[in-house]
Amino acid sequence: MPLSPVAARRIAWLLVGVLGGLALVLAFPPSPKRTPPLTTALGATPAESRTGAAPVRSDPTEHPPAAASATTSHAVNAAERALQLDGDLHALARSLLSQAEAGDAEALYALGLIVRECHFELARHGDRAALDGFLEGVPRRSGIDPEQYAALQRSRFEACDGFRTDPIDAYGTDAELFARAATAGQPMAALELELRAPLRGAPLDPEALRNAARAALASRRPEAFLLLLELEFPDEDGPEARDATPNAVAWWLLACARGYPCGPEARWRREQIAFRGGQRADLDWDDALLFDLPAHQREQARERAVELGRALDAGEVETILPQVR
């Protein structure tokens, strides 16, 4: 499916088997809300419990407060939010450029995310005619809702369109930007570099990857939980290992509860719906994530998510650090 490599890696388990989801949800309707609700157990505030929205800050590159309370939802990086909420990625890159040039870790990391996504997008569709030609074949693709799929493709085209006249190569490569961000102390940037080392032709360093994963988890940033999720699916296990599992869903549940965009407007939710399978826009984000699990595994995922959150808040990072192989 024509998603970027990173997006495909992150949501592949949500899409595998989605065509069978309708039958599954009829047999096992969404599990009833617990008392206390899962969002309360995971530390989400009432405002976040429906949308998974992070607190809004006047400066999108401002660092999260160092003295945050145990269950504070750290603000998601500006580019990560824009990627999920169809923001103008080119405009955001321009607004972050001076801060990145001054060495701001969050701005550098945001630029790395934007450059990676838009470089892939520009390679796919050089102009609007190329996009239109690509979308003409969508109705013939089994399992795809043509209108919703086209809307997703057009929104990403528009988000990156500014780079068609403002050369993206001038911003540097994603690897260069992540390396500078990591040096400046951005924890997800270091993990991104270690996870993608084989794609750059570099050997995987298990110890460096473990250290980067430990720092990312300790940061308690919501997007870090989704990067750690990738460690649940080693590449050598093949695509069959990417089915939804209680442990994988638990990391997603925690990310959503702690501030990752997970409302119906989030891109990953709209991707679920575009690939037909019974997924509905009116589901709460926890039911959307639990959708592909059989009934007996849904409670396992909920319990594991609560366990992850409690260990995280207690500073017991080592006990929940995914295995690095």
Image (cartoon, helix red, strand yellow):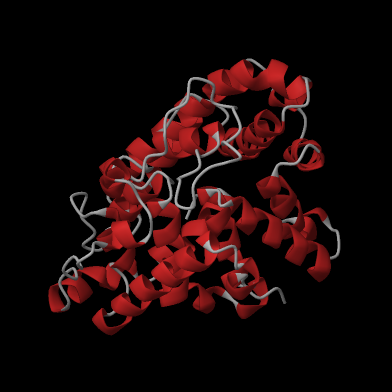
Placement of the C terminus among the 4 image quadrants: bottom right
* Residue occupying the point 39% across, 49% down: 268
Q: In the picture, residue 182 is in which quadrant?
A: top right
* Residue occupying the point 19% across, 67% down: 35
Residue 248 showing in the rendered view? yes
* Residue occupying the point 75% across, 37% down: 181
* Residue occupying the point 25% across, 63% down: 277
Where's residue 124, x and y in %? 57, 39
Q: In the picture, residue 286 is in which quadrant?
A: bottom left
Where's residue 152, x and y in %? 38, 39
In terms of depth relative to the viewer, which is nearer, 106 or 314? Answer: 314
Where's residue 195, x and y in %? 71, 59
Q: In the picture, residue 154 is in which quadrant?
A: top left
Residue 129 showing in the rendered view? no
Q: Residue furthest right?
A: 202
Where's residue 71, x and y in %? 45, 52
